Image (cartoon, rainbow, N blue to C red):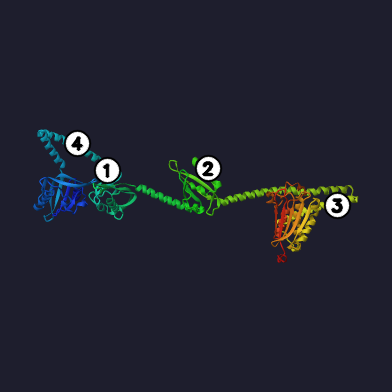
């Protein structure tokens, strides 16, 4: 087997250097660097005596001359030349500046030959014997000063040597302990030195990391060539040049296996510069750990989170999540599309800002209770959309627990239920309307029964009178009048019911013709005159357009106005005033019927034109009626293309009904 002489030279604990015939450094090992305090790159190519000029001996000779002569003799004779003891001054840099220290050396100069046997260089093996020389001098001075025999002095020297040996043993044990820690450390460690970053030390973990390949004595570039273009060579150079450490976390590195295959691992590592006496980095301590499992798990987690976000963004619902303490930290894209807020604007406690002010406190209270109970969350609230409108949503959330049952996250959703909510409201309104219609139906049936029963009593009485005295003419005439009057009343009731039925089913046919509105209003006043007079009312007709003409069904228009006058007469206390105003406004014919009657509260005003609706609290209810007159009047007005509206300041303040109808074309033209 071949021995790695280069490695042996570099890592020998003894100091070696090699010079050429010009006394220029060809090579030095690490021990020589430590001994002289100079780095290899500072020495190579320079003359030895330019770097270390040395001092002057007491006899005036130069320290450098003796060394130069010894090296020259080795070149000239081709034989080893030994300098047993020579003083030589060495200048070293310290934090306080340059310091010159004269030390004593033992140097051996060995000639090196090329393949043809010629001496081309000399290798110097240098040993620092300063302490030994000083000890000899101390013994000599002690003998001269004390007069002790050589044997006594030798005993003292041996005692001191034994103490030194004990100190060296302790240092050796401490060194072995530190080396053992270094070797057994779970993380990988190595030491590289010099500008080429040559491996000086590497522990077992580092050797496993690089597949067991030999690295000691080799540069990083030579031992691990696959690191090229991965940035590590450049980082080592940077740390050496700047003296600043570098820390990497989760850094990928591709390594080549002995079989040529490649594997990528992830490492946390630090490049820590090893600073020499001159304050410059002489080497780099490499320490780190293989974190491939951690990075693989993190990558899987990131991929899982990415898949979750993709799925969450595809859902039509708004998805969100919170930390275990309930602070939102994620909303999907649907949330931002709905609310229109910038991404991240609703994280933390800001989520409540997009809730309706009236719903915030309730939502916060329910959420706080869910957090305290670790129970599912559910609440309805109004959420502001991107247009500033509030829509009803259903908020839900459930806790996500780890293997130990601890809550690690809350996952929630917000579902737009605005249309559903509105549908429920409309359904409830429909139900209420049906209930009201049912009440009105019952009321109508009761009223109809009452209205139909009232004429029967007079008719029955008249029949009895006829039975008792059929031959008396006055009895027959009175009975005939009663029967005729009550029959007419019943006929009107039946006709009103039939009209309502025909109108609601769309079966009414209008017989339109040109007619003067004033004549139709006068006919209605005549029809209701008896009722108005019986109630003691004063009726006023005010018109500023007596010639207004309509293209309408005269009977139906008269029926509308008659119903309005009947209504005013019945619901105005005796002695009241009824004003009928006929005018023209904005190209329409207008008939207003105002009274000083009982008026209407807003609730009744909103449904006064509904079927079977009457002022139930009015004492004038005794005047009869089925509550269908106003509903019929409005339907007939709409069939003519007109409108019928009602207004009242309130109870006891009278009412106004306004009928608007389109004028006949010829009547419209002038205005």
> CA separation, marks 3 and 4?
155 Å
Residue at image position (30%, 55%) is 229
User: Which label belongs to residue 480?
Assistant: 3
Residue at image position (75%, 46%) is 619
Callout 4: SS: helix
Name above or below for residue 86 compared with residue 542.
above
Q: Nearer the viewer, mark 1 or mark 3?
A: 1
Of callouts 3 and 2, the N-terminal one: 2
> CA separation, marks 2 and 1?
59 Å
Q: Position of residue 385 (x, y in %)?
A: 53, 52
Q: Is residue 613 left or right of residue 83?
A: right
Of callouts 1 and 4, the N-terminal one: 4
Label 3 near label 1: C-beta < 8 Å?
no
**Image quarter in which the C terminus is found:** bottom right
Q: Is residue 94 left or right of residue 355?
A: left
Badge 1: how crowded within 10 Å, few (<14), some, or many (20+)? some
In the image as oriented, which residue stretches furthest toward the left?
Answer: 77
User: Which label belongs to residue 166?
Assistant: 4
Q: Nearer the viewer, mark 2 or mark 1?
A: 2
User: Which label belongs to residue 161?
Assistant: none
Q: Nearer the viewer, mark 3 or mark 2?
A: 2
Of callouts 1 and 3, the N-terminal one: 1
Q: Which residue is mark 2?
A: 365
Is residue 506 visible to us here?
no
Count of marks overlaid on the render: 4
Of callouts 2 and 4, the N-terminal one: 4
Instruction: Name the one closer to the observer, 170 or 537.
Output: 537
> CA separation, marks 2 and 4?
77 Å
Label 4 near label 3: C-beta < 8 Å?
no
Q: Is residue 289 left or right of residue 406?
A: left
> CA separation, marks 3 and 2?
79 Å
């Amino acid at each position: 087997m071949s021995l790695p002489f280069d490695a042996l030279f570099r890592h020998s604990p003894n100091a070696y250097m090699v010079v050429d015939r010009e006394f220029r450094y060809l090579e030095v090992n690490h021990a020589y660097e430590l001994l002289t305090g100079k780095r290899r790159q500072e020495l190579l190519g320079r003359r030895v005596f330019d770097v270390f000029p040395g001092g002057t001996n007491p006899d005036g000779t130069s320290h450098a001359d003796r060394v130069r002569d010894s090296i020259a003799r080795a070149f000239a004779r081709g034989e080893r030349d030994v300098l047993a003891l020579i003083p030589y001054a060495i200048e070293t840099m310290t934090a306080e500046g340059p310091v010159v220290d004269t030390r004593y050396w033992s140097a051996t100069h060995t000639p090196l030959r090329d393949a043809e046997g010629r001496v081309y260089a000399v290798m110097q093996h240098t040993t620092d014997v300063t302490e030994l020389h000083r000890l000899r001098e101390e013994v000599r001075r002690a003998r001269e000063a004390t007069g002790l025999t050589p044997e006594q002095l030798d005993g003292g020297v041996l005692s001191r040597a034994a103490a030194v040996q004990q100190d060296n043993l302790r240092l050796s044990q401490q060194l072995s302990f530190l080396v053992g820690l270094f070797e057994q450390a779970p993380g990988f460690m190595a030491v590289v030195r010099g500008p080429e970053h040559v491996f000086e030390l590497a522990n077992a973990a580092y050797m496993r990391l690089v597949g067991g390949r030999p690295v000691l004595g080799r540069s990083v570039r030579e031992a691990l060539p696959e690191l090229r273009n991965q940035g590590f060579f450049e980082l080592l150079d940077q740390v050496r040049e700047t003296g600043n450490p570098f820390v990497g976390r989760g850094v990928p590195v591709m390594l080549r296996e002995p079989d040529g295959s490649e594997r990528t691992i992830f490492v946390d590592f630090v490049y820590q510069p090893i600073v020499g006496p001159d304050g410059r980095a002489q080497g780099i301590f490499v320490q780190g750990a293989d974190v491939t499992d951690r990075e693989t798990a993190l990558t899987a987690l990131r991929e899982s989170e990415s898949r979750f976000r993709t799925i969450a963004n595809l859902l039509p619902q708004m998805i969100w999540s919170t930390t275990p303490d309930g602070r939102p930290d994620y909303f999907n894209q649907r949330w931002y599309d709905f609310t229109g807020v910038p991404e991240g604007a609703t994280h933390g406690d800001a989520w409540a800002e997009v809730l309706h002010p009236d719903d915030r406190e309730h939502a916060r209270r329910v959420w706080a209770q869910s957090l305290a109970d670790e129970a599912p969350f559910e609440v309805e609230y109004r959420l502001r959309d991107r247009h500033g409108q509030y829509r009803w949503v259903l908020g839900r959330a459930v806790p996500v627990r780890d293997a130990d049952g601890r809550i690690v996250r809350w996952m929630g959703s917000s579902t737009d239920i605005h249309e559903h909510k509105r549908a429920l409201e409309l359904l409830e309104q429909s139900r209420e309307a049906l209930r009201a219609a049912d009440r009105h139906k019952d009321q109508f049936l009761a009223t109809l029964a009452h209205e139909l029963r009232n004429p029967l009593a007079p008719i029955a009485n008249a029949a009895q009178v006829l039975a008792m005295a059929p031959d008396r003419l006055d009895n027959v005439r009175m009975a005939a009048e009663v029967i005729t009057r009550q029959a007419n009343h019943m006929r009107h009731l039946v006709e009103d019911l039939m009209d309502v039925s025909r109108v609601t089913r769309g079966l009414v046919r209008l017989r339109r013709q040109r007619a003067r509105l004033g004549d139709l209003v006068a006919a209605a006043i005549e029809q209701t005159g008896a009722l108005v007079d019986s109630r003691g009312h004063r009726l006023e007709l005010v018109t500023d357009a007596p010639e207004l003409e309509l293209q309408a069904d005269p009977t139906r228009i008269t029926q509308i106005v008659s119903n309005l006058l009947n209504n005013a007469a019945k619901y105005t206390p005796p002695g009241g005033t009824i004003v009928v105003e006929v005018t023209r406004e904005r190209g329409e014919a207008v008939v207003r019927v105002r009274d000083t009657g009982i008026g209407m509260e807003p609730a009744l005003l909103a449904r006064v034109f509904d079927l079977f609706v009457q002022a139930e609290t009015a004492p004038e209810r005794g005047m009869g009626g089925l509550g269908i007159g106003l509903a019929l009047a409005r339907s007939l007005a709409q069939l003519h293309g007109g409108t019928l509206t009602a207004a009242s300041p309130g109870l006891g303040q009278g009412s106004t009904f306004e009928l608007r109808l389109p004028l006949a074309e010829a009547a419209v033209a002038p205005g």
